[in-house]
Amino acid sequence: MSTVLEEQLGYFFFDKRILTRALTRKAYALEQRQKNEHCDDQEIYRTLGDAVLKTVLTELLIRAGSDTRQDITTRKIELEREENLARISQAIGIGYVLKLGIGEKQQRAYDQPYVLAESLEAVIGGIYFDGGFSAARKTIRRLFKDVFPIE
């Protein structure tokens, strides 16, 4: 199932454990730990992914002609909006492969914009961690191809 997501991303993980962790919500990881099973969640990759996303979007905006800090900031905020990230996440099918806690499943968290947005950031962070900045940049360009057409 993760292979379908990798196809949608256009990036195939060298270390599949990184992708698994990027798709593992904190509630699921806590439930596994309560069963004395080792399980890492996506939080550190979300932090990393957020930073990488901001960096790449800033670069792409400058390359697209934004020439003031105000313009870059305004446009970047719009691109990073939860609804926008959730829409991209939904389009590539992240919600279908998330590891959710019992309560999250009952609340249909796989459809919640904040869960989808956070998980997209985690996957971007995972790509950076697995394949480096260039791989993350290429993937972000692909995900935002409607905004930044790829030459």
Image (spheres, helix red, strand yellow):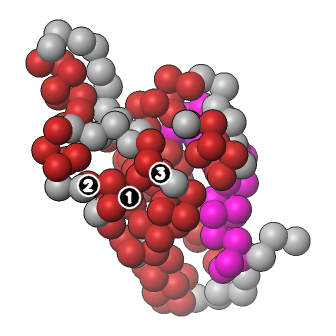
Q: Which residues are magenta?
A: 125-148
Image spot of residue 10 (x, y percent): 72, 49
Q: What crowding class fits label 1: few (fewer than 14 Cα within 10 Å), some (14-19), or many (20 or more)?
A: many
In the foreground, 122 or 132: 122
Mark 3 and mark 1 in contact? Answer it, CB < 8 Å.
yes
Q: Secondary structure at mark 1?
A: helix
Among the two numbered marks 3 and 2 on one chain, the one whose residue lies closer to the N terminus: 3
Instruction: In the rendered view, tell whether residue 103 sits above or below residue 59.
Output: above
Instruction: In the rendered view, tell whether residue 116 sits above or below residue 96.
Output: below
Q: What crowding class fits label 3: few (fewer than 14 Cα within 10 Å), some (14-19), or many (20 or more)?
A: many
Q: Three-letter amino acid code at disc 1?
A: Leu
Q: Secondary structure at mark 2?
A: helix
Q: According to the image, label 2 marks what residue?
A: 109
Q: Three-letter amino acid code at disc 3?
A: Ile
Q: What crowding class fits label 2: few (fewer than 14 Cα within 10 Å), some (14-19), or many (20 or more)?
A: some
Distance from the alpha carbon under mark 3 to that under mark 1 = 7 Å
Residue 100 visible? The answer is: yes
Image spot of residue 109 (x, y percent): 26, 55
Label number found at residue 116: 1
Question: Residue shown at 56%/25% (left/top)?
Answer: 16
Q: According to the image, label 3 marks what residue?
A: 94
- Quadrant in which the N terminus appears: top right
Distance from the alpha carbon under mark 3 to that under mark 2 = 11 Å
Image spot of residue 111 (x, y percent): 33, 61
Q: Would residue 87 appear left or right of 112 to someone viewing this image?
A: right
- Quadrant in which the C terminus appears: bottom right
Mark 2 vs mark 1: give the one in front: 2
